[in-house]
Image: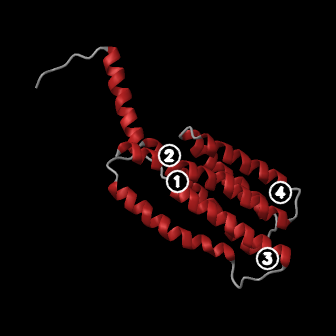
Amino acid sequence: MKEENFSETDSLKLINEMISKVKRSYVTKGIASMVWGVLIITCSLLTWAEVRYNWDPGFDVWLLVFLALIPQIFFSIKEKRSRKFTAHDETTTTYVWSAFAISIFILSFYNSKFGSEQATTLFMMLYGIPTFITGGMFKFKPMIVGGLICWALSVVSVFTPVDADMLLMAGSGLFAWLIPGIILWNRYQKQRRENV
């Protein structure tokens, strides 16, 4: 095997090429983001209709969240098995979103036990945290902006009635997850077309 001498420039060039390959191989499709965006928007609007028009769907619409978990877990396991490596930022993102999920579960449990109508403020505040961090880690401005919007809507909800809070919650789902998810999906499709 022939030994090659690399200059600093050649070494930096090789490192940059490797980083570019890793970035290209890690493609976030945006499907999970779109699913959660649609889910939060739907549940929020249904809850708004319940509060505003005294409408009873016959079940707690927020239980639909558990239905969305099933395909998400399935696709996460499938994607994890097909991956050849896990980048450091992916591991960090997993911990951030796991902490978010645990916090949402605890807040939901607390809310069901003590029945606070103001919990939407806290939910939107929590929505902003992983969205903002993930956007910052991947330098993805739509998620950074989505996180900021969640926090702004959270503050606004302190001054609004419950039915309006549900519309603000729908806005959080739209800006934090649905719009960024659509953008990611479009990027993924464009990248697939270019690589074919």
Tag in front: 2 or 4 = 2
Q: Where is mark 2, residue-wise?
A: 187
66 vs 15: above or below: below
Decide: marks 2, 4 in contact (CB < 8 A)? no
Tell me if 194 is positioned left or right of 120 in this view.
left
Residue lying furthest left: 1
The residue indicated by pointer 1 is 30
Of callouts 3 and 2, the N-terminal one: 3
| Element type at mark 2 | helix
Considering only order in the chain, which callout, 4 or 2, is on the residue closer to the N terminus? 4
> Gap in Å between the C-alphas at discs 4 and 3?
18 Å
Q: CA distance from mark 1 to mark 2?
A: 9 Å
The label nearer to you, 4 versus 1, is 1
Mark 2 and mark 4: Cα distance apart in space: 33 Å
- Tell me which numbered mark, 4 or 3, is placed earlier along the sequence: 3
CA separation, marks 3 and 1?
30 Å
> What whole-number distance in Å separates the C-alpha atoms at marks 4 and 1?
28 Å
Marks 1/2 in contact by CB < 8 Å: the verdict is: yes
